[in-house]
Amino acid sequence: MSLPTSSIHRPVTVFMVFIGIILVGWVSLQRLPVEMIPNVAFEDISIIIQIRGGIPPADVEMLVTRPVEEAVSGVTHLRELLSISEEGESRVVLRFEPGTNMDFAALEVREKFSRIVDKLPREIEKPVIAKYQKTDVPIVILAITGTGYTPEMLRRLVDEKVKERFQRIEGVANVEVVGGRERKILVEARQTDLQRFNISLGRVINALNLNNLNLLAGEIKRERDKFLIRTMGQFENVSDIEEIGIGVSPQGSVIRLKDVAYVKDSFLEPIDLARVDIQPVVSLYLQKESTANTIKVVELVKKEMEDVRGLVPRDIFLKLTYNQAEAIRDAIKAVKNSLLWGGILAVVVLFLFLWDIKPTLIIGVPFPFP
């Protein structure tokens, strides 16, 4: 007996089979992770190096960028090498051939870069070797504004009370704070005073590096325990920095840092500016884990926002300026509508065939079937 004949004689069995398929599909659909795009890695690896001291672009290229280019130019499957030298920053971008295993490529880049990192200037910050992926794009951008608050005040509030709350959300991999100048201790040397005391700028820098340290000085052992002895030399305030001795005058007096430089508790110069509703903002960029569900993570973020509003002052406002879950919901809604209308049209066409009704009389367009 053929399958169509068996299906006609056993309608209850066929009905139960289709009900079972629908139930399995519905359960699978509810548990299926929903994402806008798959987590794929781009064929790019960036080496980002920050340099202290405001070194001009020409010196950045000669002292940092070129040695890095020469070190990593022999990486396997390298297609293109791009470098950007700016004031105080060097960026080298490596682009690989399609299909390259980016995990192994990143390991090879780190290995070759480690051979020359000790030859770079001492003024560089810790280098960052970044492999860009789709999950590195923030799924939520949260703006924090406040009436009568400066961006620096907002940033301090966010760092102390807000950032940690969002980092603890399940599925959130990283929270980056953007906006508001970071606090920095600025030491501005006076050239005339340096020449008067015959002190070089390098001597001042070495004095700062050697004094801002906490070092192990030994230990005291007892029968059941021991005590560690440390020399506490880390700066606690601006006055400690000003009192550093950097030399001795011909008369035998100590030359202190405040005699040749200004020490200020200040902020770095602003590079860009962001506003929401005319007010300056500090933004939080939330990135999710690669296996987390975007829609669920966003719902948890919204719930946490309500809790955070009770911790901050009433004149501090939190606002979602970007929400990737909305785009995902719109895409899912469009797919559902397409499936629904496709099913309706399929039923209509089958009905027309069964009742031998000419489709041209219904919609006015000739069909490719008789």
Image (spheres, grey):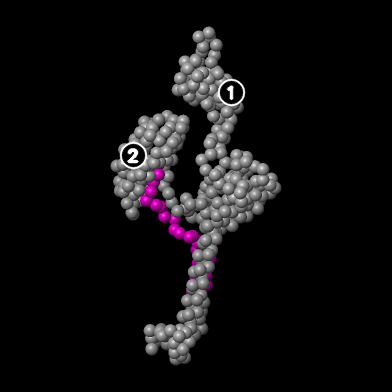
The residue drawn where x is 50% and y is 76% is 341
Of all residues, the one furthest to the right in this rendering is: 314
Identify the residue at the far bottom of this view. Answer: 356
Q: Earlier in the sequence, mark 2 or mark 1?
A: 2
Q: Secondary structure at mark 2?
A: helix
Residue located at (68% from left, 47% from top)? 315
- Give the residue pinned by disc 2: 69
Mark identifier at residue 240: 1
Q: Indicate the amino acid at tag 2.
A: Glu
Q: Quadrant of residue 149?
A: top right
Mark 1 neighbour class, 10 Å CA radius: few under 14, some 14 to 19, many 20 or more? some
In the image, residue 30 lies at what x, y percent?
A: 53, 66
Question: Percent x, y for residue 35?
Answer: 49, 60
Point out the stretch of residues depicted in magenta.
20-47
Label 1, secondary structure: give it.
helix
Q: Which residue occupies 70% across, 47% down? A: 314
Give the residue displayed 52% in from the left and 61% down from the top: 327
Q: The C terminus is located in which quarter?
A: bottom left
Q: CA distance from mark 2 to mark 1?
A: 41 Å
Above/below status of 150 relative to 355:
above
User: Residue 295, relative to residue 116: is it above or below?
Assistant: below
